[in-house]
Image (cartoon, helix red, strand yellow):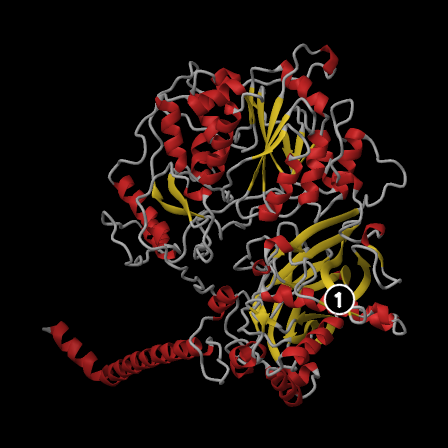
């Protein structure tokens, strides 16, 4: 009773406070509800603003990325897959005027590919990968969120209902893969595999153990290098080199073949199905020598895919069927490998160990390897992507091993792998059909569990230039639902690693001539001596970007616009310098017939564009090549104090964080590209800098701060700018307390083509109009105009608006005037004797793609059996 009275007194005393508290809670609830409504409304407005306008200025319901992909208006992509997000190498990114203190989250920009019709039942042994891929059937890529290796963002998702799975699929990985896969056939394959797996019909439950030691590690032996004199070897072994190549680095492949060639060995070359130019060149190489052949079939061999193992097994089957090729060892190579010892040394070593199989093990605890490698997960390859579909168990009694996917195998073991029908081999082929990176583990596991386990030597005879700090950045997320690593390219300072190894090695990787050719030159000279004095082009390197046989459809519109402008500017310069000679006036015909990257002394020197022309006076035709040279635009202020750390500032696309270069050499980009700003720093004190992007109409597109720590060497950030970007000269500034430290200009090129056809105003004028409302982000940064001391934007906007209606010759004139500010013509040459007396032959120049390159030329076989 006393307690009740006290409660009543307390209630009477504090009833006003209680009422006020309830009122506050009610108001807070209303505010939260109101803010949620506002957020939803803002999201809807943001969605509307992300639409690109049509030619009438109305909102067009087209996603800009989808339009970019479908209409091929994106920037040049030289055989490389574009990164979907660039992680900034900085401590903090602060968007000016925003509450966000980091980058906006990546939104789903995936695109639906065309449907293939009714999918056939999946057969794991089918050769579907051998047929040509249909255009537009690239998988929709969804980047994985940070955290668990291979985690898939957005799972679970409801799959498309264009087919009926044979079972109820509930796993989040499988549902995510079904949601993201681009083609109906791929989705059908995924569903069939998952249903088989759920029913326990896909994976072997247990596999036999034929190794008498029962533990792989005890079977490992070490092979030494006792004598390097080949003349003392009886019955020297013969090697078949299996080269798996892709891309367009033909000259580097020729240089590799030249270094490893001997008449007693054999060379079997598989070219990725997507690399038609490389395939045409390899077929020509095979015509030169009877012991060089190209596979009559081709596959798409993606990183980490089951297709690579399938290609190796198919090649081994071919090689065993070639009765005229008597080989003892199978060695796989890529075009980015190079020998570190001579052919004679390799043959001597293998002859001394002719019954050994050389594979490099992971060297770590087995359970950790399985987890890190994803062998306990189910994967499937389709749509040129490796999809993670869920978990699986390792077969009982199986001792899993693995490591490097570069190996040297005896013919006896290859015969066992290809021809054996025992339960171990057939079961492991089934198991690794649905494994990530199967070539890194399949042969190790077969050998280690077989009766030949005592032939295993823990050495792949290679040295790989690993720098995991740079090479393990999950750069293959667009290809596989997992995090992967890639070795770095060798540079001269890295070659010491080859000398420091105690185990025998005969090959090294990776080498890329577009990154560093000097390291290849050092090894080549070490093995076979220097070329004679006066040999030309020793420091030069050319790499094809386009050939007429590729078809103009292989070019995107930004590249076609740029190459055509380079060539026109070259012809115009020729007319200007030879104004008195009518014989030196030409007009271009059609499209370019070839385009090359040109490097000298490991520096990019520009583009080489070859095209047919017609003499204005004589109407005769000839083939000319123009050299377009990029101009530097960086300006560094004086008296930088602590900002002396800043060494370079550059904007481009296709930034490679592993090699720290832009793969889009020269920075050719268009309105629908996604540029990245990169700063290079020396070591020094911690800094905070402000980065500002300014468009051609003096619109401040974005401003953000970056923090640079003491050890930082590079910082990069790709702001999520709304597109289309306004064509013209852009400026990126680095500021210290709003004072300019550095400034770099870059060109967003106007487009003269859409779908390789001249641009039409009524259809595509929007692409030159800039973003809707002149806002590149969801907020305006124009309040910074006075701080940055920019001119008024209104006159520039009016001038930019007039240019959106340009077509034909006026549009070409706008393109050429824009390009002229960033590129100059280095020289011009003719394929044959020109009607213009001042134009020399391309074969007599030092820069032309037609000039001699002795270091990469494949000549006749010499008396010692070599061609180098």
Percent position (x, y) of residue 387? Answer: 40, 48
The quarter of the rendered structure image containing the N terminus is: bottom left
Percent position (x, y) of residue 742? Answer: 74, 69
Task: Answer with the quarter of the image where residue 26 lies.
Answer: bottom left
Q: Nearer the viewer, residue 35 or 670?
A: 670
Position of residue 774 relative to residue 242, above or below, is below
Q: Which of 266 and 724 is in front in this view?
A: 266
Position of residue 63 relative to residue 284, above or below, is below
Task: Answer with the quarter of the image where residue 509 lies.
Answer: top right
Q: Is residue 448 visible?
A: no
Q: Name the residue under label 1.
A: 614
At 85% across and 64% down in the image, what residue appears? Answer: 836
Crowdedness near tag 1: few (<14), some (14–19) or many (≥20) residues, C-alpha within 10 Å = some
Task: Answer with the quarter of the image where residue 108 lies.
Answer: bottom left
Q: Which of 860 and 509 is in front in this view?
A: 860
Percent position (x, y) of residue 336? Answer: 64, 40
Q: Can residue 702 be seen in this view?
A: yes
Position of residue 542 relative to residue 702, above or below, is above
Q: In this view, does 366 lie to the left or right of 351?
A: left
Percent position (x, y) of residue 261? Answer: 69, 29
Q: How many marks?
A: 1
At 60% across and 82% down in the image, what residue appears? Answer: 804
Q: Secondary structure beneath disc 1?
A: strand
At 75% across and 40% down in the image, what residue appears? Answer: 856
The quarter of the rendered structure image containing the C terminus is: top right
């Amino acid at each position: 009773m006393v307690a009740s009275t006290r409660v009543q007194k307390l209630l009477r005393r504090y009833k006003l406070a209680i009422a006020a508290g309830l009122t506050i809670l009610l108001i807070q609830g209303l505010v939260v509800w109101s803010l949620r409504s506002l957020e939803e409304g803002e999201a809807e407005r943001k969605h509307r603003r992300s639409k690109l306008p049509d030619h009438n200025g109305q909102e067009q319901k087209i996603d800009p990325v989808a339009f970019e992909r479908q209409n091929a208006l994106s920037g040049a992509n030289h055989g490389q897959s574009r990164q979907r997000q660039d992680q900034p190498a900085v401590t903090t990114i602060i968007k000016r005027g925003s509450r966000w203190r980091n980058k906006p989250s990546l939104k789903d920009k995936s695109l639906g590919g065309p449907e293939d019709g009714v999918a056939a039942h999946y057969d794991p042994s089918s050769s579907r990968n051998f047929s040509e891929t249909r255009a537009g059937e690239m998988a929709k890529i969804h980047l994985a969120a940070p955290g668990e290796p291979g985690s898939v963002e957005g799972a679970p998702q409801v799959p498309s209902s264009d087919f009926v799975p044979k079972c109820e699929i509930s796993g989040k990985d499988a549902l995510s893969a079904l949601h993201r896969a681009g083609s109906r056939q791929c989705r059908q394959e995924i569903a069939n595999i998952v249903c088989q797996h759920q029913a326990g019909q896909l994976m072997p439950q247990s596999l036999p153990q034929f190794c008498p030691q029962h533990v792989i590690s005890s079977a490992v032996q070490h092979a030494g290098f006792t004598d390097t004199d080949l003349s003392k070897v009886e019955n020297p072994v013969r090697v078949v080199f299996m080269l798996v190549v892709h891309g367009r680095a033909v000259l580097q492949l020729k240089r590799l073949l030249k270094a490893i060639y001997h008449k007693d060995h054999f060379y079997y070359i598989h070219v990725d199905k997507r690399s038609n130019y490389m395939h045409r060149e390899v077929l020509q190489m095979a015509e030169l020598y009877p012991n060089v052949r190209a596979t009559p079939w081709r596959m798409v061999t993606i990183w980490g895919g089951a297709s690579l193992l399938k290609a190796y097994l198919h090649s081994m089957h071919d090689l065993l069927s070639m009765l005229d090729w008597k080989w003892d060892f199978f060695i796989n190579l890529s075009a980015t490998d190079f020998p570190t010892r001579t052919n004679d040394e390799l043959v001597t070593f293998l002859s001394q160990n002719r019954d050994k199989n050389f594979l490099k093990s992971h060297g770590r605890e087995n359970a950790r390897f399985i987890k890190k490698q994803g062998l306990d997960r189910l994967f499937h390859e389709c749509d040129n992507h490796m999809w993670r579909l869920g978990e699986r168990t390792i077969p009982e009694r199986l001792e899993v091993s693995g490591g490097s996917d570069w190996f040297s195998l005896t013919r006896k073991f290859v015969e066992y792998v290809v021809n054996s029908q025992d339960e171990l081999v057939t079961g492991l082929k089934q198991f690794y059909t649905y494994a990530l990176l199967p070539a890194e583990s399949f042969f190790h596991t077969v050998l280690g569990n077989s009766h030949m386990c005592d032939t295993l030597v823990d050495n792949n005879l290679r040295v790989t230039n690993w720098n995991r700090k740079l090479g393990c950045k999950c750069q293959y997320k667009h290809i596989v639902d997992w995090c992967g690593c890639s070795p770095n390219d060798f540079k001269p300072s890295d070659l010491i690693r080859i000398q420091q190894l105690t185990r025998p090695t005969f090959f090294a990787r990776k080498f890329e001539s577009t990154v560093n050719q000097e390291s290849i030159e050092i090894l080549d000279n070490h093995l076979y001596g220097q070329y004679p004095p006066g040999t030309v082009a020793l420091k030069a390197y050319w790499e094809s970007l386009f050939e007429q046989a590729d078809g103009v459809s292989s070019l995107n519109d930004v590249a076609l616009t740029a190459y055509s402008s380079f060539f026109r500017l070259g012809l115009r310069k020729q007319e200007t310098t030879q104004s008195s000679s009518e014989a030196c006036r030409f007009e271009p015909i059609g499209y370019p017939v070839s385009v090359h990257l040109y490097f000298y002394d490991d520096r990019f020197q520009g583009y080489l564009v070859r095209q047919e022309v017609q003499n204005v006076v004589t109407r005769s035709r000839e083939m000319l090549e123009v050299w377009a040279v990029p101009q530097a635009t960086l300006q560094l202020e004086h008296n930088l104090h602590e900002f002396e750390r800043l060494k370079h500032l550059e904007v481009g696309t296709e930034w490679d964080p592993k090699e720290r270069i832009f793969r889009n050499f020269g920075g050719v980009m268009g309105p629908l590209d996604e540029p990245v700003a990169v700063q290079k720093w020396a070591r020094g004190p911690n800094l905070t800098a402000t980065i500002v992007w300014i468009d051609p109409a003096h619109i401040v597109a974005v401003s953000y701060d970056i923090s640079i720590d003491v050890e930082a060497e590079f910082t990069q950030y790709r702001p999520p700018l709304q597109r289309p970007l306004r064509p013209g000269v852009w400026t990126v500034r680095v500021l210290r307390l709003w004072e300019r430290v550095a400034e770099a200009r870059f060109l967003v090129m106007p487009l003269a083509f859409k779908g390789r056809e001249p641009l039409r105003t009524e259809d595509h004028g929007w692409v030159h109009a800039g973003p809707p409302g002149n806002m590149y982000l969801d907020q305006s940064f124009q309040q910074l105009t006075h701080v940055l001391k920019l001119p008024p934007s209104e006159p520039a906007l009016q001038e930019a608006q007039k240019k959106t209606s340009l077509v034909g010759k006026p549009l070409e004139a706008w393109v050429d005037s824009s390009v002229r500010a960033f590129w100059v013509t280095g020289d011009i040459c003719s394929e044959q004797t020109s009607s213009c007396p001042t134009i020399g032959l391309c074969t007599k120049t030092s820069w032309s793609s037609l000039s001699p390159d002795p270091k990469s030329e494949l000549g006749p076989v010499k008396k010692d059996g070599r061609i180098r």
